[in-house]
Image (spheres, rainbow, N blue to C red):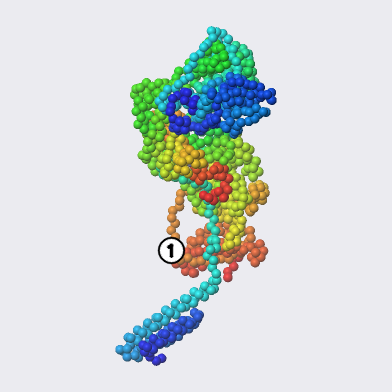
Amino acid sequence: MQTSYKWLLEWVDFSFPPQELAERLLGIGLAVETVEPLFPKLDGVLVGRVELVEKHPEADRLSVCTVSLGLEKKRVVCGAPNVESGQKVAYAPAGSKLPNGAQIGFANIRGVESAGMICSEFELGLGADKEGIMVLDSGVVGKRLADELGLEDWKISVELTPNRPDCLSVAGIAREIAALVGGKLKRPKISLKEAEEPASRFVSVETAERELCPRYAARLVRKLKIGPSPFWLKKKLIAAGMRPINNVVDVTNLVMLEFGHPLHAFDFQRFGSQKVRVRRAKEGEKLVTLDGVERSLTSEDLLITNGQAGTALAGVMGGRDSEISDGTSQVLLEAAYFDPRTIRRTRKRLGLATESAIRFEKGTDINVPPLALDRSAQLLSELAGGEVLSGIVDAYPKPKEPTKLTLRPLLVSQILGAEISSPEVSDYLSRLEMSVTPGKELSVIVPTFRVDIKEEADLVEEVARLYGYDRIPSLQRGSGPLAPRFSFFEAAADRLRELLVGSGFSEAVTSPLGNPKVFAKAGFAGPYAALANPLSEELSVLRPTLLVSLADVAGRNQAGGNPSVRMFELSKTFRPGSPPEEGWRLGLVFSSAAALHWREKGRSADFYDLAGILEKLFARFLHQPVRLTPRESLPGFFEREFELIAGGQVLGLSGELSPEWTKELHFKKPCFLAEIDWELFLKLAGPEKAYHPFSRFPAVERDAALVAPLELLVSDILDEIRNAKESLLESFELFDLYTGPQAGEGKKSLALSFRYRSAEKTLTDAEADAAHERLVGRLVSRFGLVWRRQ
Amino acid sequence: MALLSEGEIGQLVLAAEKEIESASTPEELSTLKIKYVGRSGILTLALRGLKDISPEDRPKVGQALNSAKVSLEEKIDARTSELEAAARKTARGFFDHTLPGTPYFLGHPHPLVQVNREIVRIFNFMGFETATGPEIETDYYNFEALNFPKDHPARDMWDTFYLQDSELLLRTHTSPVQARVFEKRKPPIKILAPGRVYRHEAINARSYYTFLQIEGFYVDADVSFADLKGVLHAFVSAFYGDVKTRFRPSFFPFTEPSAEMDISCTICGGKGCSVCKYEGWLEILGCGMIHPQVFRNVGYDPEVWRGYAFGLGVDRIAMQKYRIDDIRLFYENDLRFLEQF
Ligand SMILES: [Zn+2]
């Protein structure tokens, strides 16, 4: 809602300047967004009177005007067709400057000396009219135009929460100010002269949908003359951000802005009958609205008809056929109440967020139509010379009673935690035009414009607003549970971050929405949890995997000049279903060039770097090794793909990105990825393990060089060592691997180191040797290895 | 070997010292050591011959011989270390201690997650327990249970993503966790619900279609707006330090009274700057007393229980904290950005 400072001052007395008004309104919940000058500064411009208009001797289209400024007279050349003697005009003297930057001076126009200029609305920044000069309807000659027209004003723009449609009006905001200062609202005085003839002789009103249109009120005004509105009215519309059109339309808009109730004006001669009938539209029924668009309606829409055809889309937009035009002389004024949900559905379906629709859908005051009609009729008779027929034709079979509530003053103090006495509570509510009957429980009658107040809690908020939120104490009394309760999930995620960040992985947070085509192409087949109203196809489904977006981010980083990329993400993935599946996954991505460092002239990242971090992760959380089992992968995302297995369960997958995707995602180096079902993984994690005692006796180291068939998996040998459960074996390591010609055709040479230690005593060489013989001998016979002793 | 007088010992020491000084290799010194103090060195032999000296001279000469032996030994050892150190230095050649050190790879946590954890921990320590809910929600939990009736204009406060072929949506806030927890448990309840939420909004520097939110709520027999202010003040002082707060009325369908909390701008201290749009205040969170209708919807008696709730946007707070002017940076994951945290 937009209004002006001076407009508010017409409706309520208050003494604070615009900026302070903004702060005070913010304090009671009306967020003032901007306070800015309504019009540009017009310092030098004066009110002048055209005394004489003479033809320019050299130019047909120019006039030479004598402009009186009271004591002084000026001669001004003017090109406007509408200049006439006797007019009051805006005169910009030589030396003044217009808002568009034009510097006014003395000019010689085709041989005639011209001192200053008579200005148009447009040149003054006061409107859109540039056809002719601005003719003033008031103002003292010789005085500053800005003072005479009240131009020094501030546009006040309030961002309203959807519960306060009453404040979509000057009256509403003024009421809030009145409540702040404890004052009274000053409503405009209505003195309506009506003709003898009753309106009901010419028009009847019927509503077929009492639920959707519980009230329909109308007035008839005839013999009126369409023309421009006076400046005072235009100024208000401009302040509210609306465009002046003509006196009739402007009056309906002004009254809507004043009271918050939308009105509609039909050209009654083009209405098509003498009967207004409100009904639901028929499925597929057509109506051409004011904007010239043919709308196809549904039975959800409410239609104003002339008994036959639609004449307006109720509460949303009028019909083109009965639109006010320059030839209109009879006007049917409508002020009705329409069901907010119906208006909202129509508004949303047709995308017509008109000033009228946004007010009706939030809820208007059903008891304001007569007032709005009287005010409009009065203005139409004053500004358009209309004759107002007597009476309002009003279909309002079941008048709405104001809401009655009870409020326990003690409850106010309990909810707010501030001591507020019963008389104080009554006072705050009374300031908001509520009628309060005191007692142990206050009985409160809520005016019908406050559609948001429905129960006791709503009244508590009203009291709190006026009492002041900042006056409510801040209480730290350690109420409720005091002990922190940490979630296992969050603690595990913290440990995970420590491990990965410490291992050189940076955390990514990538888009949870993605492109179904890309997921499908990468081999993560559907179905996907798809959005009905996506922002774009690229963001139209919830991701089934973290790997695609994570690889994308990693590729961009590498292409953008970060040769080493190690990233992880802990986020959710989704699959449709009832209910849909969503679960936490851990994604890892790894791709790096050889380090550019004087000492580390090493290698670039490869498969074993990924395997290493996975081993670390499984050892740290699950206290068990991870097994990577090859999986047949379809041509797509992975070149080599492995299932990650621990505790007999598949916990995730890992692999090397295929060359096609490596290229597609702009990687310069091979890229390795893994994704782990984090929830399943944590299920295996269990509680922290107990402390494991260790031996303080010295250890004995023994190595073994073994020649094995090339295709024997090293994990088979390592598992066999573990399975042997050699009690003296403390640890072992594969410390060398050779696959060259000296190992023999189809062979590889492995070097293993074993550490033997007893928990009870210092081992002798003989005891260590015996254990070593047992263990290595077992490997030799199990796999047919050759043990190369020195 | 003839017996030595005190004077002769002195002369011997002087001569030996000269030889030590002029030795230029550890080997020469080793020879000198053998010559003077070795098993058959001059001084060793002289000590052995003490028994032939008259008993009255024996202590004096003995003492002189002993101190000469210790002194020469020390001198030879010191000189040997000196020569060895010099030799090591020559062998080592030039040592540049300024070469770049071995690189250790350290990753960086994401700033959003970091700020999220920081806030959650503060509330954990005030007794709030973490709870979670699904990101794909029903209309009931996201709206209806929270007192947003169907076709109500308040639903326009949050533009919503809906799922195809179902009544489901992507939650627009973490508040549905309230109703989910209330259905399962009885007060007192003190919960923190961090999580991802979605809004059907165009992507630009100030808005993104998803962000992290943290919801907190407390329900008990005697909870007031003053308690809400208290807990939020405690949070603000833990997270921001010494800042001013401002509470102003607002509207959320699931709280009544509702409020917005602002803090004095952490950048300019309230004087006005581009971060606070020259207002001196930063919007931090929305909050209020839980609406009685929410309690009725989950079967709590609003005459018995009262509660407060608050919700804050992690992305916005992280942007303020690190003065990030483009929200998209969080989701781009450029390492040049991440490595700053
Ligand atoms: Zn600031």
Residue B150 in picture, x, y percent from top left: 53, 27
Residue A661 in picture, x, y percent from top left: 65, 48
Foreground of the two, B89 or A627: B89
Image point (51%, 54%), residue name: A502
Residue A218 image-quadrant placement: top right
The furthest residue to the bottom? B2
Horizontal side, residue B140 vs residue B11: left or right = right
Residue A500 seen in render: no
Residue A557 in picture, x, y percent from top left: 60, 50
For the C terminus of chain A, the quadrant is bottom right
Foreground of the two, B163 or A651: B163
Return the residue at label 1: A696
- Identify the chain of the residue marked 1, using the numbered disc in the image: A
In the rendered image, the vertical position of residue A201 relative to residue A782, given as above or below = above
Residue A39 seen in render: yes
Foreground of the two, A680 or A378: A378
Amino acid type, label 1: Arg
Image point (61%, 45%), residue name: A548
